[in-house]
Image (cartoon, rainbow, N blue to C red):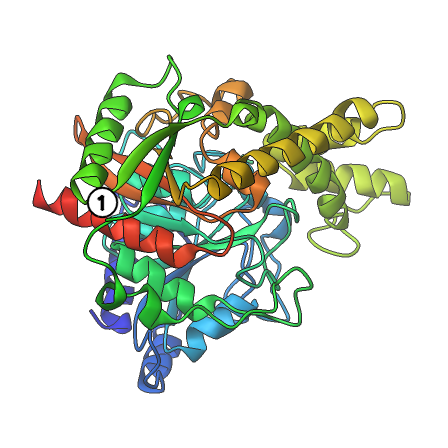
Amino acid sequence: MSASAALDVIRAAEESSGSLNAFLSIADPEAVSAAQASAGDGILRGTPIAVKDNLATLDLPTTCGSRHLEEYRSPFEATVVRRLRDAGGIVVGKTNMDEFGMGSSTEHSAFGVTLNPHDLARVPGGSSGGSAAAVAAGYVPMALGSDTGGSVRQPAALCGVVGIKPTHGRVSRYGLVAFASSLDQVGTFGRTVDEAARLLAAVSGHDPRDATSRDLPPLDPRELSGDAAPQDLAGVTVGVPAEYFPGRLDASVRERAEVALDWLRAAGAEVRDVTLPSTSLAVACYYVLAPAEASSNLARFDGVRFGRRVPADSVSTMYEATRGAGLGPEVKRRIMLGTFALSAGYYDAHYGVAQRVRASIRTEFGRVFSGGVDLLFTPTTPSPAFRIGEKIGNPLDMYREDVFTTPASLAGIPAMSVPIGHVDGLPVGGQILAPWWQEARMIHAARILESAGMAT
Ligand code: GLN
């Protein structure tokens, strides 16, 4: 489908009463046809692509799902957006998200929840729920998201699409509005492994504007493509961490994961039990470190430097009124949590301990990968898509959604979610984790699962 045709479909669907509310803004038709006319011959030539609304764009707003940035227009463009355009991709709109990336359902968007295309009473996951839903609904074949603790992989799983979080440092974060900088990474969605991998290749590579981006050439799309892929997993050892199959895992997800492990075995992989004991602390660790970083990163949204200002008599009351009015309850909760974790007298007990747990998680992944394990396989989420409203009243229920995705974020390793079947009509995702910088190996294994799933 041409980008202009995709835009027509998106406009008609999103402006109708049955809208999924996947988009916060939609590109101008004339801009899209001009981009289409000059798209060139890159690896994304003419492909319509949706972009999460925390990535800076010149022509469209960048709200981060927040009232505070409703009127904000970026004076510059994120490196990933420029790269996808350079490769011939066409931005057709900006997608809905939990405010500043904080959430697992898009219910924390200031602009209303996105609906899951598989069941309109359920969430699409989050925080990149709009991007995942846009791909799952067939509006676009590819989309960009960001993943701090699972925000690409979890919505990909809940919407039945492919979602890749690369190694921390593989993709530039210049123009990604910071949430927790030591964890934030841009990721890609696709209907298929090939599509998600192609978009990743297009946006990857060193960027002098992001000091955390590793000085490596972009991923080679040919090396990630199906043509280069081994046809089986002979000689590949896949570890299954005991900690990712806890007693409370939803029985239907466990069953699909067992089937996926059979597919890996049938393709020739050796499947081996491993343990990663510290990963059971990952959610607790993440919910200290990510809010701590967020409390610092979000200080700039004060009505002076960025965002809407609520006028008041003094500077301090202006700050209070501005932040009180502009930021939603989850964002406020994170700022409070993070400020507490960093406060004098509590710093060592909270932030310091969490940093040490993070170091153990990293060390354990390193030990498993250097002990003969090439990849790890786990479920992406503990259950399929949950109902809108089901978890919003209890933050801990929402945080537990991230049990299987936060460990890879804390370690900085690449991880991706690939569909492994359905339970009662709802998609289930399997997660593949790879050693640092081994995206190609991970993508090839995901393709094996994808083709096994299609054959059944
Ligand atoms: N759900 C997690 C959180 O709320 C992860 C979000 C993300 O990756 N941006 O923080």
Question: Residue at 80% of width from left, 37% of height from top?
Answer: 320
Residue 127, above or below 142: above
* Element type at mark 1: helix
| Nearer-the-camera pick, 443 or 327 | 443
Question: Residue at 56% of width from left, 46% of height from top?
Answer: 412
Percent across and percent down for residue 293 are: 71, 41
Which residue is under mark 1? 449
Residue 218, above or below 403: below
| Nearer-the-camera pick, 207 or 229 | 229
Estimate how packed mark 1 is, as few (under 14), some (14 to 19) or many (20 or more) residues with alpha carbons within 10 Å.
Answer: many
Percent across and percent down for residue 63 are: 56, 53
Residue 456 visible somewhere in the drawing: yes
What amino acid type should be assigned to the residue bearing mark 1?
Leu
Residue 140 visible somewhere in the drawing: no
Quarter of the figure with the N terminus: bottom left
| Nearer-the-camera pick, 335 or 447 | 447
Percent across and percent down for residue 253 are: 27, 25
Left or right: residue 439 versus residue 179 is left
Percent across and percent down for residue 126 are: 44, 39
